[in-house]
Each structure stands twice: as structure tokens, then as C-alpha cells.
Image (cartoon, rainbow, N blue to C red):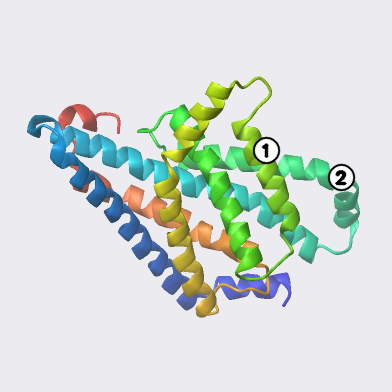
């Protein structure tokens, strides 16, 4: 199939809407699980503070989950772009330019993916209930999230085309935890902060896994264009689903914040 044929396949209305409705339903289930867990943990909180605890904790965990999806999507965006160029752009002046400057262009893609992440969590859907440090810890765990996706592609799909990407991201993730002037205490603190998001990572992988199982099974997601590209397409649907859930204010109705917490959130 040509690039145009792949595009026409993915924008076919009926299968596209069916896949999106599944994505939306799965997101609602993920958010509901978070809300349920927080509700259960609130039983030990003093009654007068329970409502505030429920709102603050639920909002924080939901936004951490959103941030992980945003970060994973941003990382996959430049990896999928790199793969598409290598796969479909085989001749012409751009191919010559790409072959001569691919390392520099890849660096530009990485920077662009960082800007995309910032656009998603600050402009498209402002995440106001988590601070910069919390976002950084989620972005660290999102790198592990992407590496596990690669592991799935390599060992479950038995596809060795991404071995270089796996090695690259292992080094990049280690670099995020162990940097030039980091002390052992800094390393432990980084690991602890990132580790707090492991349950959300597991949920995100389950979310993506179900989407891929349904998508590949229904032939909406295609293996022929690269499993990595199809995984990124699934993430695009996830981001759109988050945007819809966010703008419907469903969470505000569920959390029912007190007056002091509803201002500016």
C-alpha cells in the first residue's frame, strides 16, 4: 500500500468512529477506576476533609494519567515520523537531505516532541492540579512506558526493526535518572517519584493493549505500515478522547469540588 492508501484507510468514517468510541469508553473506565480507588482510600479521612481529599487526589491522579498519555504520544510522534520517512520517502531531494543530515533532523524531532508535550499539557488541556516536579516524574515513567511498547513489539510481535530505538531509549531513560552532577540521593529521589506513577503506567499499558488488540483484530490498525505507527495512531485517538472528556466537564460533576477548590481549576 502507498502512503495515500494508508491515509484513506485510517480516515474511513465508520471504522474510525467505531474505534474512537472504543477509545472513549476505555478512557471512561480508566478514569472510573482512579475515582473508585481514591474513594476507597478516602474512608480513613476525617469526614470534614473527605470531600476536599477526594477532589484534590482524584484530580491529581487523573491529570497524572493524562500527562503520561501526552508524554507517550509525544515520544511516539517523532519515532513514528522517523519510521515513516525511512519507510516511504525513498527518493527525491528531501531523501538526499535526510540521508545527509538525519542525525540533526532527529534531534530537531526530539525537540519538537518536547514542545508538543508542552502544548498538550499547557495549552490544549491545561493540567493545573500537578506541578512541574510531578510532570517531570510522569514523563520519566512515560519513557519506560514507551520502552515496554518496544519490548512488546520485539518479543510478542517478533519484530526486530526497532532494536536501535530500544537501545537509544534505554540510554535516554538512564540519562534522565543519572545525570552529570547527580548524587546518589538525587537518584533515589528520582526513582521514588517516578515509582509512584507505576500503577498509572500499568493502567496506560492495559488501555493501549486493549486498543491494539481490538484495532489489529478488526484490521483498522495495520501491521503493514509498521506496528510503531499504528501504536502512535492509537495514541492520537487517546488524546482526542481526553480532550472530549476534559471539555464535557464530567470530572467536575463527579468530583463536586468545594468552593475554595473550584476557583481556577
Q: Is residue 229 left or right of residue 85?
A: left
Residue found at x 47% / y 53%: 239
Residue found at x 67% / y 38%: 111
If the image is split into quadrants, where does the N terminus sit?
A: bottom right
Residue 123 can be seen, yes or no: no
> Residue 43's spot in the image, x, y percent?
14, 41
Q: Residues within 10 Å of mark 2 (few under 14, many from 20)?
A: few
Q: Quadrant of residue 157?
A: bottom right
First reached walking from the N terminus: tag 2 or tag 1: 2
Camera-nearest residue between 117 and 43: 43
Judging by the rendered image, the residue that carries numbered circle 2 is 101
Q: Which residue in the rendered view is the most extreme toward the bottom? A: 218
> Residue 28's spot in the image, x, y percent?
32, 58
Camera-nearest residue between 60 and 86: 60
Real-space CA distance between mark 2 and mark 1, rounded to the nearest whole angstrom: 16 Å
Camera-nearest residue between 70 and 161: 161
Q: Is residue 17 above or below residue 258?
A: below
Q: Is residue 15 left or right of residue 262?
A: right
Q: Is residue 29 above or below residue 134?
A: below
Residue 172 can be seen, yes or no: yes
Judging by the rendered image, the residue that carries numbered circle 1 is 111
If the image is split into quadrants, where does the C terminus sit?
A: top left
Local SS, label 2: helix
Residue found at x 22% / y 30%: 261
Q: How many marks?
A: 2
Q: Is residue 258 above or below residue 151?
A: above
> Residue 175's spot in the image, x, y percent?
66, 34
> Residue 240's spot in the image, x, y percent?
45, 56
Amino acid at each position: 500500500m502507498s502512503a495515500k492508501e494508508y491515509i484513506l484507510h485510517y480516515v474511513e468514517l465508520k471504522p474510525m468512529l467505531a474505534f474512537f468510541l472504543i477509545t472513549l469508553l476505555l478512557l471512561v473506565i480508566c478514569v472510573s477506576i482512579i475515582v473508585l480507588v481514591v474513594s476507597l482510600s478516602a474512608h480513613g479521612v476525617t469526614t470534614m476533609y473527605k470531600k476536599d481529599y477526594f477532589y484534590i487526589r482524584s484530580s491529581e491522579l487523573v491529570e497524572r494519567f493524562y500527562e503520561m498519555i501526552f508524554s507517550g504520544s509525544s515520544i511516539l510522534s517523532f519515532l513514528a515520523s522517523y519510521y515513516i520517512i525511512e519507510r516511504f520517502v525513498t527518493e527525491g531531494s528531501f531523501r538526499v537531505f535526510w540521508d545527509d543530515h538525519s542525525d540533526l533532523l532527529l534531534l530537531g524531532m526530539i525537540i519538537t516532541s518536547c514542545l508538543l508535550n508542552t502544548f498538550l499539557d499547557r495549552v490544549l488541556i491545561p493540567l493545573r492540579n500537578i506541578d512541574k516536579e510531578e510532570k517531570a516524574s510522569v514523563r520519566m515513567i512515560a519513557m519506560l512506558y514507551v520502552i515496554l511498547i518496544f519490548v512488546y513489539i520485539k518479543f510478542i510481535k517478533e519484530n526486530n526493526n526497532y532494536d536501535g530505538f530500544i537501545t537509544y531509549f534505554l540510554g535516554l531513560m538512564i540519562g534522565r535518572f543519572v545525570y552529570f552532577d547527580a548524587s546518589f540521593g538525587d537518584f533515589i529521589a528520582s526513582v521514588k517519584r517516578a515509582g509512584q506513577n507505576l500503577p498509572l503506567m500499568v493502567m496506560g499499558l492495559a488501555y493501549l493493549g486493549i486498543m491494539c488488540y481490538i484495532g489489529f483484530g478488526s484490521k483498522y490498525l495495520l501491521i503493514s505500515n509498521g506496528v510503531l505507527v499504528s501504536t502512535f495512531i492509537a495514541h492520537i485517538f487517546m488524546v482526542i478522547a481526553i480532550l472530549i472528556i476534559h471539555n464535557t466537564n464530567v470530572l467536575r460533576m463527579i468530583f463536586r469540588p468545594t468552593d475554595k477548590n473550584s476557583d481556577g481549576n
